[in-house]
Amino acid sequence: MIIYNVTVNIDNSVREEWLHWMKTIHIPDVVATGCFIQGNIFKVLVEEEQGTSYSIQYQANSMDDIVRYRDQFMPRLQQEHTERYKEKFVAFRTLLEKID
């Protein structure tokens, strides 16, 4: 199993609206690509000087699913997020592999 993790620090002025949009639109849109089994959002429990941080984790069966997402869907979905929350967030992405 591969986890595609997106950590986002979102400005508190848009945090509630962003959370609603992430839960009701963005995460379901990412999962609907068929590249992921599920998506979950977690609040990062650390004090921030600015904003609030969240970890959004999408579970995929294989690297092939991640590559398909990256090549076919990611640019459009990231662009939607960037346009909607321009200058109100910072994000970084990591890939995690479950070790049995």
Image: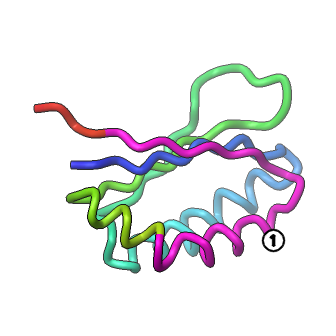
Q: Which corner quadrant of the image does residue 20 belong to? A: bottom right
Left or right: 35 in relation to 15: left
**Residue 75 in the image: above or below residue 18:** below
| Side (left or right) of 100 relative to 77 | left
The residue positioned farthest toward the left in the image shown: 100
Q: Amino acid at mark 1?
A: Glu
Label 1 residue SS: helix
Around disc 1, counting alpha carbons within 10 Å, would you say few (fewer than 14), some (14 to 19), or many (20 or more)? few
User: Residue at the location (88% across, 49% down)?
Assistant: 13
Q: Which residues are magenta?
A: 71-96
- Is residue 80 shown in magenta? yes
Q: Position of residue 68 (x, y in %)?
A: 37, 72
Q: Is residue 74 above or below residue 7?
A: below
Q: Residue at x 75, y 45 (%)?
A: 90
- Magenta region includes residue 76: yes
Quarter where residue 9 is shown = top right
Residue drawn where x is 59% and y is 42% of the image: 7
Q: Which residue is mark 1?
A: 83
Front-most of residues 28 and 83: 83
Of 24 and 57, the residue lying toward us: 57
Colour scheme shown: rainbow
In the rendered image, the quadrant that contains the C terminus is top left
Residue 97, compared with residue 88, is above or below; it is: above
Front residue (pair 7, 19): 7
Residue 78 position, x and y percent, is: 64, 67
Total marks drawn?
1
Q: Position of residue 1 (x, y in %)?
A: 21, 49
Please identify the quarter of the rendering in which residue 96 is found: top left
Where residue 81 appears, x then y in whole percent?
A: 70, 67
